[in-house]
Amino acid sequence: MKKLVVFEAIAVLIGTIIGAGVFTLPYVAVHSGLATTLIWLIIVSFIITYLHLAFGEIVLRTKQDFRLPGYVGHYLNSSAKRFILLITFFTFSFSLLIYLLLGSQFLRIMLNSIWANFSFSQGFLVIFLWFLLSLAILSKSKRLSKINFYLSFTLLFLFFIIAIFALPHFKAENLNFFDFTNRWGWLIPYGVVFFALNGMVAIPEAAKVLEIKGENKEKLKKVIIIGTLIPAFCYLIFILTVAGASGSFTSIEAIQGLRGILGNNIVLLGAILGFLAVSTSYLIFASYIKNSFIHDFKWSRFISYFLVVVGPLLLYCLHLENLVKLISFIGGMLGGLEGVMLIFVLRKAKQQGEIEPPFQVPLNKVLIVVFITALVIGALCQTFLVY
């Protein structure tokens, strides 16, 4: 029974991590270089695992239940809380825009399978999908987290099916190990991988699963490490098989480029599952930030719903449509700043936390300088050098 509880907590983290970011990884590997992407996958896996463990320690040291902005306000000050509010708002608004763009790609594949001779514009599909998902947000569905949970593992199963069928078509000559045509292209995988592996919002939920089921919270360390590294390993397999099979034909959402290899049925199935996974993730992220506005910042329900619904559409109207660069920016810039705040919160939590946690992550002046410098440089590079 205890093993099942640990597995359930691990599944919560894996189900949250695996989402929109994974679909763009093979495309990034083809255009930025496979070796570059894999090196960043290793580096970022280490950084994200540390940040997840740091957040786990913060959760275990604190009696109250918060989201990240709440922990920032609890341990730092109101100015820091307002700053993390700004970061949270832009992170989730940009993430919602990414889900809209990727969801429209999957929707186009699905519609083209039905009406092969009819062309659907990107703008129309984005607005149409935004309208449908906005209606769903206002409907207040309570089953989205469970749906997303099962879809994430269905997607994981689909990735391995794709890998198995694509493996016989693997050709080493399809792999572009290094790309020297774009001066700063080697930086793009950093932000994309960061976005794809970031599961910060699931850490308190995983801790809650262990607590509710009566499991010792010292298992949270094991849950975080396994729950972070399994997606990283799955991403590695997905990158190698898709990029090795489709080569320069690798599409931005990974699925369309495999049509000539796997056939229409597998591509259509992948598009349907991808569309459902992205759509439910959109609704869950929207619900998360809406609840953060209402409960952590005491804003009215009207303003909270309005910002969540209108935010991604306003960003799209600014012609922010480059999916890979958006994901790279979110992962590198906003994710990096979130990581910096987390380091500061952990430092305070070690000094002021109410509970002695069952595990602690190392944190000294050297580590603080190293992590903050790395995260800030990564954030600046994604913003000023890549663009």
Image (tube, grey):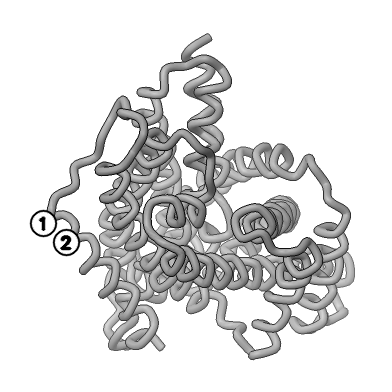
Up-down relation of residue 70 to residue 173 (above or below):
above
> In the visual, does 177 lie left or right of 387?
left
**Percent from the top left, x then y, of residue 108?**
77, 71
Up-down relation of residue 385 to residue 4 (above or below):
below
Classify residue 158 by image quadrant.
Answer: top right
> In the visual, does 250 lie left or right of 263?
left
Instruction: Determine crowd level at label 2: few under 14, some 14-19, many 20+ residues with C-alpha closer than 10 A.
Output: few
Nearest the eye: 25 or 1: 1
Classify residue 303 by image quadrant.
Answer: bottom right
Q: Are dots 1 and 2 in contact, CB under 8 Å?
A: yes
**Disc number placed over residue 370 in the picture, else none:** 2
Residue that protrudes farthest toward the top in the picture: 1
> In the visual, does 386 lie left or right of 305?
left
The residue tagged 1 is 366
**Residue drawn at the location 68% of the way across and 75% of the way down:** 312
**Residue drawn at the location 37% of the way across and 74% of the way down:** 188
| Amino acid at circle 1 | Val
- Element type at marker 2? helix
**Disc number placed over residue 266 in the picture, else none:** none
Instruction: Determine crowd level at label 1: few under 14, some 14-19, many 20+ residues with C-alpha closer than 10 A.
Output: few
Label 1 – label 2 distance at C-alpha: 6 Å
**Percent from the top left, x then y, of residue 120?**
82, 80
